[in-house]
Structure formats: structure tokens, C-alpha cells
Image (tube, rainbow, N blue to C red):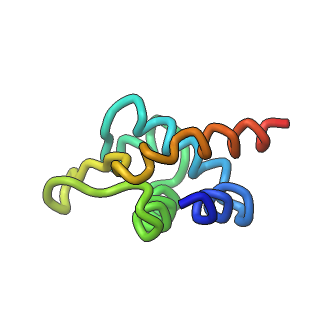
Amino acid sequence: MEKALWYLLTATRGGANRARIIRCLDERPRNANRLADELDVDYNTVRHHLDMLRKHDVVEPGGDDYGRLYFLTDRFERHREEFERITDRMEE
């Protein structure tokens, strides 16, 4: 998971938005539309980032396609400290 987080957050252009999505989902589960509204990011961009985060087991969906909520995975929670270290370095 550590390597995946470094890749997702620092090795690609979308790292900052992915970190914002993770922080938003940490507050409470949300669907892609709500994330797009709250983060002022295009819906398709949010969907792309959610797909990447899902592929690397950071988020998981719940519910049906329409209004599907996204949650942080238990695996991510076990590596939360690494996420915090990476995002701290991003802000430097």
C-alpha cells in the first residue's frame, strides 16, 4: 500500500485531487457527484480519480450504480499514517 500511495499522490498530476478526495471521504462517505460539487472538480475527473483509488484498494464502493457511495477501505486505514506523511511532504 505504501508504494501505491506514493504513486497515486506524488507520481501523477492528479495527486493533489486524490488527496482531497481521500480527506473528503474521511469525513463521511459520498457519491461521485457530491465529491465533484464539494471539491469543485469536474464529475468525470472525480470518476477517474475514484477508479484509480479503487484499483489500488484505497476506496471501495457501496450501493447501486446510481448514487453509489464511496468509502475508505480497511486496508487504507491500516496505512493512514503513511498517507499523512506523504501529504505532509506534498505541502512542503
Residue most extreme to the top:
27
Q: Position of residue 88 (x, y in %)?
A: 73, 36
Q: Position of residue 57 (x, y in %)?
A: 41, 62
Residue situated in front as seen by the camera: 41 or 50: 50
On the rendered structure, is 91 left or right of 46? right
Q: Position of residue 80 (x, y in %)?
A: 52, 41
Q: Quadrant of residue 64?
A: bottom left
Give above or below for 53 relative to 82.
below
On the rendered structure, is 47 left or right of 82? left
Q: Position of residue 77 (x, y in %)?
A: 42, 43
Q: Quadrant of the C terminus?
A: top right
Residue situated in front as seen by the camera: 38 or 22: 22
Q: Quadrant of residue 34?
A: top left
Please tell me which residue is depicted at 38% across the width and 55% down the height of the picture: 59
Please tell me which residue is depicted at 67% across the width and 48% down the height of the picture: 16
Please tell me which residue is depicted at 33% across the width and 32% down the height of the picture: 28
